[in-house]
Amino acid sequence: MAAPASLADRTETAERPQVINCPNCEAPLAFKRNRAPRIDSCGFESYSLECTECAVALAGIIDPCDETLLLSIVPG
């Protein structure tokens, strides 16, 4: 029996980048989910990004309810 397809394989985001806005400067950023995502200690698919315009560090998780990326600015 074949292994079930991963969540990233079943979504459009696995194929095409999604445009998101930086929460700091509102610059558009291209985001593409990984086919083999990093799962954090709480069980969330997590990502680290840097804004190409303002260079702020961003952290995000995929909301398991609607599969949207929830971003926050990393303090530092």
Image (cartoon, helix red, strand yellow):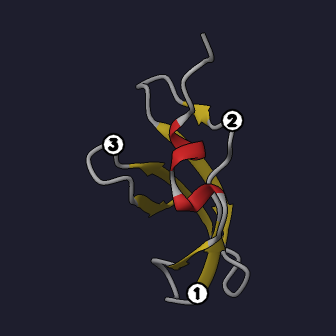
Residue that extends furthest to the top in the rendered view of this protein? 1
Q: How far separated are the C-alphas under marks 3 and 1?
A: 23 Å
Q: Is residue 27 above or below residue 32?
A: below
Q: Residue 57 in the image: x percent, y percent?
A: 63, 64
Q: Where the C terminus falls, by quadrant?
A: bottom right
- Residue at left offset 57%, top offset 45%: 8
Q: Nearer the viewer, mark 1 or mark 2?
A: 2
- Residue at left offset 51%, top offset 53%: 11
Residue type (three-letter) at the residue carrying disc 2: Ala
First reached walking from the N terminus: tag 3 or tag 1: 1
First reached walking from the N terminus: tag 1 or tag 2: 1
Front one among 55 and 41: 41
| Residue where numbered disc 1 is placed | 28
- Residue at left offset 44%, top offset 34%: 44
Front one among 31 and 25: 31
Q: How far separated are the C-alphas under marks 1 and 2?
A: 24 Å
| Residue where numbered disc 3 is placed | 64
Q: How far separated are the C-alphas under marks 2 and 3?
A: 16 Å
Q: Is residue 38 above or below residue 4?
A: below
Image quarter of residue 68: bottom left
| Residue where numbered disc 2 is placed | 36
The mark found on residue 72 in the picture is none
Q: Residues within 10 Å of mark 3 (few under 14, many from 20)?
A: few
Q: Residue 67 in the image: x percent, y percent?
A: 38, 53
Front one among 70 and 37: 37
